[in-house]
Image (cartoon, rainbow, N blue to C red):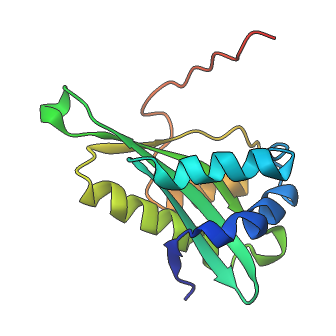
Amino acid sequence: MPKARLAQPSDLRPLLDLFRGSEVSPVAEPIAHAERIWTEMLARQGVAVFVSDAGARLAATCMLISAPNLLRGGRGHGFLENVVTHRELRGQGHGRAVVGAALAEAWARGCHHVLLQSGRQDPAVHRFYESCGFRPGVRTGYVANHPE
């Protein structure tokens, strides 16, 4: 069974390679810009990036963002973002490893729930999230895009 670990500063280039091969969106460019963002992400309280290795490359990743909350008895919110598994390595447990690590961290941080949104239409993606414990239809998601 693959294992997840917290991302390290040296994971930036392999992480960008993983993102480039995904259907999510373009990566931050140029590399100097990506390096500034990566440094900020790793230093930011409440942010944790998990990765799973497959030999010399990253197989999967996800980012947990947790935030304090005055409701829910003071228990925080967790948000899962940037869930990506290398297309050639899907179905091998790498995605499950990083999502499981992120959920365990969220519960350790006292989050009362973890929210996840997906813009993917592939039913297999939604089955995967449901198999990890996420339930569809509990909340309604809304998106406001930055005005161009």
Vertical placement of 134 versus 95: above or below? Answer: above
Vertical placement of 47 versus 105: above or below? Answer: above
Where does the image place residue 78, in percent across and percent down from the top left?
A: 39, 44
Vertical placement of 112 versus 14: above or below? Answer: above
Whether residue 15 sits left or right of residue 95 in the image: it is right
Where does the image place residue 98, in percent across and percent down from the top left?
A: 54, 68
Residue at left 22%, top 50%?
110
Residue at left 39%, top 47%?
46
Quarter of the rendering occupied by the C terminus: top right
Count of marks, rendered view: 0
Where does the image place residue 13, in percent across and percent down from the top left?
A: 78, 66
Q: Nearer the viewer, residue 113 or 81?
A: 81
Residue at left 81%, top 47%?
27
Q: Which of 107 and 129 is in front in this view?
A: 107
Residue at left 43%, top 57%?
133
Q: Can residue 122 be seen in this view?
A: no
